[in-house]
Amino acid sequence: MLYKDDVPFKITEKMVNEVYHFMGWSTKKKPRPAVIKFPESIYRQDRANNRKIRPLRVNIPLEMTIFIEDEGSVKWNYSESPGREVDKQMVYPRKSKPMTGTFSVGVEKIDLLWFLIKSKYRTNMPDEPYRAQASKPLFKIEMKEKEAEAKLAKDKLQTQIKAYINGDVNTAWTIEKIRKYALAFGIEDAEEMGPNEVRMTLLGRINGEPDGYERFEKLANSNEETEIIYIVKKAINEGKIKFTKTRKWVFVEKGKEAQEICGLRIRLTAEESLVEFLKEDNVMKGEIANLVEDVANEEK
């Protein structure tokens, strides 16, 4: 049961929707319970046995204060049993919820789940960098629905990209296009490799990066940027352009530095700086493309 400023409070539809959104629950099927666990940050390092040990017990406070627009600071309590008034003050049976291990909270206790989601003792999710959080969070909430959706999307992406690179005649890209994207992805000698070697090398590189499939998808969906990256890497490989000690890109003519192309941009690498410059300067992009041997057009 929730208490708002010591008054029994029935969870609203808006609050229920907040829980469903946070958990990634669907209204079309029965939601999976939320799983409450100890965060790794609370584990103790056992150096003698080279392992981490979780705490035997923590106490999750069942009282919190939240600032609400138009209302100011509001005190919230959660209690399984009704509170009672003592000397004009509300007293609750428990001030905290003991946690000795992983436990689940289903939709039938959505008021408790709402409270835990709002608690500052919950670890922040990656998309909550600015949410107020205790210096030592006591628990984290696993969201099985969102995790399942994310895994499904990732599996679908991997299947699609593998089909581009190593699929059948109906789905696979031409070997010329595969070499082009492999070079743009950072495989410098892609154009010297045989068909099977470049396919295996590209898939190995994609699998070897934590976000390899996402980075390759971005290339596949950004034809103009991929074309520029390809031209840049090919021009570098062929010695047509170079990045100098003075932190500038220049053309190379007969082995010597010639006309300046652009300089280094703040917070970007040398290649990223050149790519961003060529996005804005089609004339210069055309000049570099003309210097590169056999620059392939994007296949439709």
Image (tube, rainbow, N blue to C red):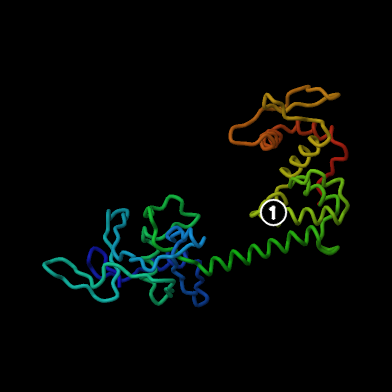
Residue 223 in percent (x, y) is at 74, 47
Residue at screen point 84% across, 64% down: 168
Name the image quarter holding residue 161: bottom right
Residue at screen point 49% across, 73% down: 27
Name the image quarter holding residue 293: top right
**Count of labels shown?**
1
Q: Residue furthest front?
A: 48
Residue at screen point 73% across, 43% down: 224
- Judge the density around disc 1: few (<14), some (14-19), many (≥20) Cα neighbours within 10 Å: some
Q: Secondary structure at mark 1?
A: helix
Looking at the rendered image, the quarter that the N terminus falls into is bottom left
Camera-side residue of 10 and 187 = 187
Residue at screen point 75% across, 40% down: 228
Q: Residue furthest left?
A: 87
Residue 19 in percent (x, y) is at 43, 66
Camera-side residue of 167 and 139 = 139
Q: Is residue 246 left or right of residue 69?
A: right
211 lies above or below 117? above
Residue 101 in percent (x, y) is at 42, 71
Residue at the disc numbered 1 = 217
Looking at the rendered structure, the kind of residue marked 1 is Glu
Camera-side residue of 115 and 254 = 254
Residue 105 in percent (x, y) is at 42, 73
Q: Is residue 82 left or right of residue 28?
A: left
Camera-side residue of 276 and 213 = 213
